[in-house]
Amino acid sequence: MYIRTTEVQGDPTSIDDGLRLVREEIFPAVSAMDGCVGMSMLVDRPTGRCLTTTAWSSEDAMRASAVAVRPLRDRSERALGSTSGRYVHQWELAVVHRDHATPDGAFARLTWLSGDQSVIDNAIDTYRMVVLPQVQEFDGFCSASLMVDRETGRVVGTAAFDSREAVEASRDATARIRTGIVRELGARIDKVEEMEIAFAHLHLPEMV
């Protein structure tokens, strides 16, 4: 499984307009493409930051869709009121575990790490054996996933929860887990974000 992420800095007042376009036009068009297995959109309403994710059954399917999704991405960017461009990246999906579907009002914590290429396999094993068993015990846990870029040594772990309150309640415990993992891997924390899961239609198989 492979993932394409698009990061956009939008206008906070345009978030709902962008979401409406995604639901009504972008998602139906993307989900009809060969190999697409879903789409999600995370937003930080106070800042206008948006992270859109499309999932693909293979790397070939993801790459084959690149030209077709470009005009859709342009429309979404305009609807979100972005004036600073976008950042598009492609990932391998290494781990997926779902307890239950995300309800309305769900939030996610994203942890972005980087290191050298040797970090990747250790990060995947550590996420499966150390991180996931602990995170899935937190109140309100919905699902977790790990995306990796083997060429650059980048890793993104995402944990979804039923609500903003559940994310906040797990913050201190997650920080302790993160500190130990980063030390063990020799990786760097690039950023940690907590974002609203505004749109979630990802049909990903269990991968643990």
Image: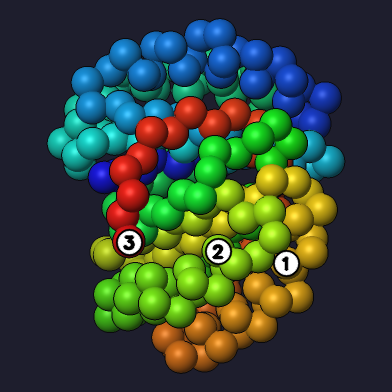
Please name the residue shown 47% across and 17% down the image.
27
Residue 136: give its label. Answer: 2
Q: Is residue 194 left or right of residue 206?
A: right
Distance (Cα) linking label 2 and label 1: 11 Å
Residue 186: give its label. Answer: none
Element type at mark 2: loop
Element type at mark 1: loop
Q: Mark yes or no: residue 49 visible.
A: no
Reading the image, the residue beneath label 3 is 208
- Location of the C terminus (image quadrant): bottom left
Residue 125: % across, % down? 33, 76
Asked if the residue under mark 1 is in contact with the one under mark 2, i.e. CB atoms within 8 Å, the reply is no
Asked if the residue under mark 3 is in contact with the one under mark 2, i.e. CB atoms within 8 Å, the reply is no
Q: Mark yes or no: residue 168 visible.
A: yes
Q: Is residue 19 left or right of residue 54?
A: right
Q: Is residue 14 left or right of residue 36?
A: right
